[in-house]
Amino acid sequence: MSTTIALPVAELKPALIGLGKVVSKRTTLPVLNHIKIERTKEGWIALTGTDLDSFVTVRMEQPANGEPASVLIPMEDLQSVVKTCGKGDTISIWTGEKLSGASEIRYPIGQQEMTTKVTTLPVDEFPEIPRFKGDSIPIPDALRSSLHEALECASVDETRMILNGAFIDVSDKKCHHVVGTDGGHLYASNSFSLPLDQSVIIPTHRFLGWKEFSNDGEWQLKLGTKPDKDTPAPLQISSRRWRFITRQHEGNYPNWRQVIPKEFTITVEIDPDAAEDIIKTVERMPNHDQMNHTLGIEIAKPGINLLCKSAGDEPWTRVPVKGVTVQGKDLTIYLNRHRFIKALKFGLLRMDIIDPMSPIKFSNSGRQLIVMPLRGQEGTVVTSKPDPAPEQRSEPIPPPEGEADQTANSPTPESSPGSATDTPTTSPATIVSNGTTSSSIETAITQIESIKGSYRDAIKGLNELADTLKQAARDQKTADREMQSVRSTVEKLQKLRL
């Protein structure tokens, strides 16, 4: 008996892009390179791909005539055929007993129909797609937006899998939260109330950030049945035509509330009209620190200045910023520029600060982003357009905390033969350009830069080693999943009776 399943190319092209988010080209388990194409008795056609951990299914827009059928087609072969077709074309998947372990992909070229024969696998080798019972939980647009923002802040460290996702915390029955963190910054959003009895971790997956899925109508959430007491239930997120199924990470999410500061001494309000200009300014600034991407924020009423430099041994350059309102004392704080840009892009335009060492809070209504500052970044600061300096002007160095106002207004002592100011001084305000003290400091600076270079090389080596170990862990995880699938297949074969 032969079966034909027709697939419109206009729908198939974006479908393959979405399925490609989960179907891996590099796997030792051949069935994971295939797409399952099935037609129900009602005529609906659906395509499914999987990597064992997650399943992605898309349904065609219109039902088609024909008996129920299902077939596995290699993803790569289907993509190759679709690339040669126009949007108005339709391809057909033809399978029958005469082909014996193969199928045909038929597609038009001009006025003719071409046929490509592909080797396929039995349908029963495809992993079983989980089924969910019960009612769906609607995810409104505001919650979906918060989930995307939380996933952007989630960790990518595979040694801390519990942080690799967005956490829907329902422990507070009056106000649920969506949380995401990587240990360096933390996102939290509230004002939600979902009919959930238990908190949920939605693992990070590139399919969830795909625009086609986000724009395909309202999301619906379903939780499956827990396999056992200690294993979390699988979850399903579906839209109008797409369905994403995955399993949650095992473990308990950290107590995220304890890192959120309560009282602040400084508040900076950024005008919404100025936010985009500030983002563009920061993106154009030189970046001397490729590891931490350091950006300085100098709070000097009535506004703020952004601090940057192109090399580690250069002084900080001050860039004034317009469109901000400041309340509180003056200080300078340093943080990762990408996290600062992220906060502004999220629309979190209120910045609350305690001191240079405490977490910074960016907020707007019920959403907040907590960012840890960077330490040990102090140095000389110059304006972006400095005034002409007088000759033989001494080089300023930063004063200790709490003495900025005093030292900024302190006059530079003038030297005259025989006066006390001939003696080199090491005061916080100034340092002479010649003499023993200057020579010693230059030597010390040279030694510091040499040590910093050695540390940079060591850190670079550790980062490369960490990347190698992460890749090994991913390979081991994939091998374990594939071995488990092979064992399941062998067990099924052992149960067969001739």
Image: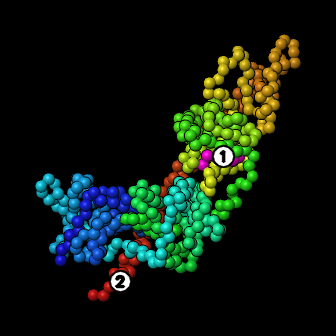
Query: Which residue is pictured at 30% across the width and 71% down the height?
Result: 44
**What stretch of residues is rendered in magenta?**
348-353
User: Can residue 5 be seen here?
Assistant: yes
Left or right of 197 on screen, residue 56: left
Q: Estimate how packed mark 1 is, as few (under 14), some (14 to 19) or many (20 or more) residues with alpha carbons within 10 Å.
A: many
Q: Nearer the viewer, residue 180 or 330?
A: 330
Q: Residue furthest bottom?
A: 497
| Vertical position of residue 100 compared to residue 19: above or below | below
Instruction: Residue 416 in the image: state x and y as whole percent.
Output: 83, 13
CA gap between label 1 and label 2 equals 64 Å
Left or right of 285 on screen, residue 208: left
Please, what is the three-letter code of the amino acid marked with disc 1?
Answer: Met
Picture quadrant of residue 10: bottom left
**Residue annotated with mark 2:** 494
**Residue annotated with mark 1:** 351
Q: Quick one: SS at disc 1?
A: strand
Q: Nearer the viewer, residue 367 or 335?
A: 367
